[in-house]
Image (cartoon, rainbow, N blue to C red):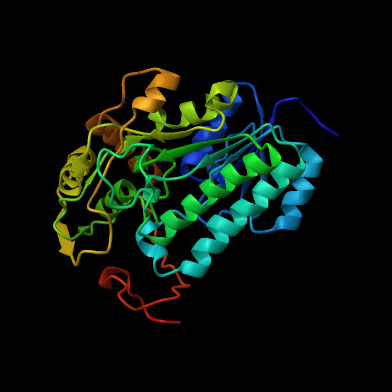
Amino acid sequence: MKTTSNTVLVTGGAGFIGSHVANELLILGYKVVVLDDLSGGFKENVPEKAVFIEGSITDFNLLADLFKQYQFDYVFHLAAYAAEGLSHFIKRFNYTNNVIGSVNLINEAVKNNVKCFVFTSSIAVYGENQVPLREDLVPAPEDSYGIAKYAVELDLKESHQMFGLNYIIFRPHNVYGENQNLGDKYRNVVGIFMNNIMKKIPLVVFGDGEQTRAFSYISDVAPIIAKSIQDPSCYGETFNIGADEPFTVNQLAQTVIKAMGTDAKISYVEARNEVKHAYSDHAKIKKFFGTHPYVGLKEGVTRMAAWAKKAGSRQSKEFKDIEIYKNLPPAWVTKKS
C-alpha cells in the first residue's frame, strides 16, 4: 500500500553524493527510501529520517519486492563503483554493478510507472574531448567506467522512446566534501590526500601532477540534483554539474596540505592511463536552475578538512577482485589471490 504520494528511492544513499541527495530530498518533504549494499558507503551516512535497506541493485528480485512495497514515484540512481582508473582492470565487476544493476532499476521503473528516473552519470563519458566539455559533444569514453555510464544514458533514452519513462541525466565531476569515503585509495583524490596526511604517509600523485580537473564541492551539486524532479522542463535533459574553475592535481595537493595544517610529502609515481584535462561547461544547467555563488576550492577543502579531522583516518582497503593485472599501475599492485 502506498504510504505517500511522494516516495523516492535513492540508490547509493549510504555513499557520498547519495547521502547528501537523500538529505536534500527529505528537506524538500519527500519520503526517502535508501538502498545501499555498504560496499563503499557507511550506514551512519544515511539520513536519520530515511528508511534504510541494505541490498544491491544487482539483486533484481529484491528490487521487484521494493518497488511493489513502496510504489516509488521517483528514482535517484547514484549507486556505482566510480573508480575510473581501476575500471580498466575490473571490467566484469564494473559492468555488472554499473550497467546490469542500472538496467535492473530501469526495468522496475518502467514496470511500475515511475514518474522520473534521475541518473548520476559522469563526465567520464566524454573521454579526451575538447574542453570545456559541453553536453552537445559526442561522448567518446576511454575507460570502462565511462563506457558503462554512457551505456546507461543510452538505455534511458531508449526506455523513454519505447516506454515513456521520463529521465534526467547529471554528469558531475570530481565532487568532494563531507561523507566521502576516506579509505578508498582508488577514487576521490581529495579524500585520499586527507587520509594519507592523517596516516602520516606521502600524498601519491600519478605522473607529473599537471592533470587538470574542476573540483566540485558537494553543496554545489546535491541540492540541484534533488530538486530537479520538480521542474518537468528538465525531463529528458542531460546536464553537466559542478565547479567551473580547473586546477592541477599539484595545486590541489598544496591546497589540501595547507587546509590540514601540516607538512606532507608528495610521492610522484608512474602515470596511469587517464584523461589529462577534464572540466565542464555549465551554461546549460545555469539556464535551467539559475546561478549561485559556488564554493571555491580553498573554502570547500577547508570545510572538508575540518570534517575529516573529526572523522579520523580510515584504513585503505585493497580491491581484492582485480581481473586483469597487465599494465596495472604499480601503486595499485598487491599480492595476487
Query: In this rendering, does residue 30 appear at all?
Result: yes
Report which quarter residue 175 is drawn in: top left
Check the picture and name the quadrant holding the C terminus: bottom left
Q: Is residue 66 above or below residue 183?
A: above
102 horizontally vs 321: left or right: right
Q: Is residue 82 above or below residue 268?
A: above
Q: Is residue 54 visible?
A: no
* Between 333 and 166, the one nearer to me in the picture: 166
Can you give x and y, in whole percent of width and height, for residue 188 in the image?
A: 35, 50
Front residue of this view, candidates 112 and 222: 112
Asked whether 131 or 312 is in front, the reply is 131
Please provide percent x and percent y for residue 64. Answer: 76, 50
Position of 180 compared to 207: left or right?
right
Residue at image location 39% in from the left, 33% down from the top: 241
- The spot of residue 177 in percent (x, y) is 37, 38
State whether residue 282 is above or below residue 199: above
For the image shown, how many numbered marks are present on the structure? 0
Q: Give the quadrant of the N terminus.
A: top right
Instruction: Give how far across and how far down residue 234 sits, in percent.
Output: 53, 26
Q: Nearer the viewer, residue 249 or 44?
A: 249
Image quadrant of residue 316?
bottom left
Residue located at (19% from left, 47% from top): 253
Is residue 233 depicted above or below 173 in this figure?
Answer: above
Left or right of residue 300, residue 86 in this image: right
